[in-house]
Amino acid sequence: MNQVIPGIPTAKRQPFSFIYTGLIALLVLVMMSMGAEAESLVSVKTDRVKGLPSDVAISAIWPYQEQLVALGQDNLWVFDQVANSWQKNDFVLQGAVSSVVYNKDNTYLLMADNADGFINKVASFTLTDQSLARDIPTLPQPLQSAAGAVLDEHLFIVGTSIKGIPLMYGLDLSVHDLSWETYPVWQQQGDEIVTSVVAQTDRLQVTLGSSTGKREFMQQWDVKNGWNRRGEVPGAIVEGTGRPIGQGHVLYLTVSPDHTKTKMMSFHTITGSWAELEHWDNHTVLFGTGWKEGILWVEPSNNLGESHLAFTQIQSRQHFLTLVDWIVLVVYLALMLGIGLYFYMQHAQSSEANFFLGGRSIPFWAAGISLYASNASSISYIAVPAKAFATNWQYLMSNLIVVFGLMFVAVWIAPLLRRLNLISVFHYLETRFHPSIRLLSSILFVVFQLGGRMTVILYLPSLALSTVTGIDITMCILVMGFVTICYTVLGGMKAVIWTDVLQLFVMFGGTIFAIVFILMKLDGGTAEFISSAMADNKFKLIDLSFNLTDATVWGFLFLVFFDTVLTFPKDQVLMQRVFSTSSDKHAGRSMWTFSAIVIPGSAMFFLIGTALYVFYQVHPERMDPSLSLDATFPLFISAELPVGITGLIIAGIFAAAMSTLSSILNSVATVSTVDFYEKRFKNKLEKQNVRFAELVTVVAGLIGIGLALLLASYNANSLLDVALELWGLLGGGFAGAYTLGMFTRRANWQGVVIGVTVSFIVTFLSWSIDLVHPYFYMPLSVFVCIVVGYAASWLFPAVEHLDGLTIYSDKAKSEKHLIKS
């Protein structure tokens, strides 16, 4: 029978009116105003660059490590930006440079050392040694009209042979012994000349013209799909001007067929759409190169003989929030604080059970909603639409399969652990195996949540919002962090769960409006959306190929089996909601609620990504070429949506971040108090334990804020990848311990220790040799731990008295084995 604590509202007395009033206030605010006419998203600024001396004729120009290098008749010239002058360099070059391949780190010169001008030599260029570095083999065949690009540590050269046959060669730059490899090419259609090759993300963009003057067209190539024709080029590409920008665009200078107009064009490699950014009438451009955030080009010499250089670059325009948007955002944040204060006034901190588990009186449906809200972070709100925008719906299959895993958890796992009356899920590992296993797994959980997950949750959405809205990234991090700390400390688990309920409605409401808004903006409405998306295979869901490097059904089955079915209890953040329900039956029902929301919720985020794809395919001029793919949805929110709705959806991004953040803070405080503080200070009063948990909540939140600000200062994105990889490397072993504990009677603590140790070794070895994608580190570690741990357990005595600790125990026996919390 559930204990009802005086002053604590029961499930029937939760603050429905408070949440309802808050939602009404938000809706009234967003209907206060409609959006104004959309302004241009980018501007183009053109400046002159000082030309070389009059007696120097430029034959090639390229960027080199933030510098600008020009090739004259016999010497190199380097541009000194500070002095605004060209400095002659003593570098001596043997052979004629036909084309230049460059990226951030390397420069390669495509050269011809014979009179016919065919390219047969590639040289690695560096100014530091006053010579050409690294001996690169001669091309298998001489090429004409060749160009190249560096993609995934491979140098690709595309051109035509002496007989006019297209050829593509690749060179793996990561190995010591260099050797050219021949790659398949597109199906040739008449006389074709390569005019540019540009690498963007994971693709090569190859433009092709002809000696007969026909319009140019584009071919796109990637390792997985091969060649794909992307249609005609609006003009002729100016030599050397193709350059990638952002994560999806390529900039070009093109010349109209009548040579009367030069244009700066952007091509979006995902939607296949062109947009004009700027044009110049009666303007002659000889050739150019990418430089900084734009294109530098060479014009014919003036009357004095001095070469003319001009530079044009894109300047992004941020879309600042209106007063109505700020009011909506402030009202949302006030609601979060209000819910925390409400439960504080209701004595939410009167006991550990209240602060950590909401008095074990949370309705199953609210716990289920909170499970979804805490699992669907701001990364999902931003990254999932970006993934669907760039690819298709194959990753949705992961969530469809997860639902079946959650059903298993609802029937077997959640009721089993709820009957044990746990607060910390790691307590189970101590009861089933040994205190040291509980201690190590708890430490790993706290370290990862503080050092990895919290930092990502705060940093990434703040970065995306600051990029497009002008909201200071530091302010984003501080506001989300401090507001979440406040309502989590004030209201404990009840505040966390009931804010999750409100935040889910905010997230879903904003997303649904954005989808409907896009459909209304399309001339053909829903029919145009469906036909365009289907034509480009954007709804592709199932991949039955046996390839663990792609999003296949078999890969997802493998992941869900090990990451959900067998090891769901490893996540204290999720399990704490299960423990907050009133009984084992309600614990199972919370998981059923969670599983019921997963499919429509996930489909909604994929749907907005596909809708954005169709919208920007129709309106390519509404994109900002300099932004990353993850900024696609935030850009649409800030630039296209009506006033008020923008504030609501940004509140949704805040909600997605804060729901996960509050869950992490409360869980870290719970584990720190129950697994460490109480075991060290066993005679402390319950009120003192709660005060310690409040202190940990504040300290943990400040650590997360501090690390996120550190990332913002140094832009150290690589640290995020390292943190996520470490979780896969270190977390799988202890996750496998739950499987051995719940699903076997034979497993003992000695076998588990051996299994965890071996899993660490195997996973680190796999990481060191890149055996599998990092996505599979966790299931690999779990698998090794289960197999080795179970086998090793036979070397030691069997464990007795396992009633209630495995799925083989009935309910009656389980109730005799309650763990005192």
Image (cartoon, rainbow, N blue to C red):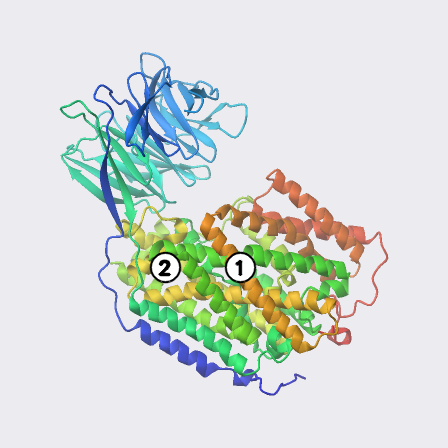
Residue 203 vertical placement versus 477 (above, below)? above
For the N terminus, the quadrant is bottom right
Query: In terms of depth relative to the viewer, which is nearer, 418 or 550?
Result: 418
Q: Residue at x 46, y 31 (%)?
A: 154
Q: Position of residue 538 (x, y in %)?
A: 40, 51
Q: Position of residue 265 (x, y in %)?
A: 26, 41
Query: In terms of depth relative to the viewer, which is nearer, 164 or 345?
Result: 345
Query: In terms of depth relative to the viewer, which is nearer, 187 or 182?
Result: 182
Q: How many neighbours does mark 2 have within 10 angstroms: few (below 14), some (14-19), or many (20 or more)?
A: some
Residue 704: mark in rendering: 1
For the C terminus, the quadrant is bottom right
Q: Position of residue 106 (x, y in %)?
A: 43, 30
**Amino acid type at mark 2:** Ile
Q: Is residue 463 visible?
A: yes
Q: How many neighbours does mark 1 have within 10 angstroms: few (below 14), some (14-19), or many (20 or more)?
A: many
Write down the quadrant of residue 50 in the picture: top left
Taking the image as shown, residue 775 lies to the left or right of residue 300, namely right
Query: Where is mark 2, residue-wise?
Result: 471
**Amino acid type at mark 1:** Gly
Q: Of helix, strand and loop, which one carries label 1?
A: helix
Residue 592 vertical placement versus 385 (above, below)? below
Q: CA distance from mark 1 to mark 2?
A: 20 Å
Q: Residue at x 67, y 58 (%)?
A: 443
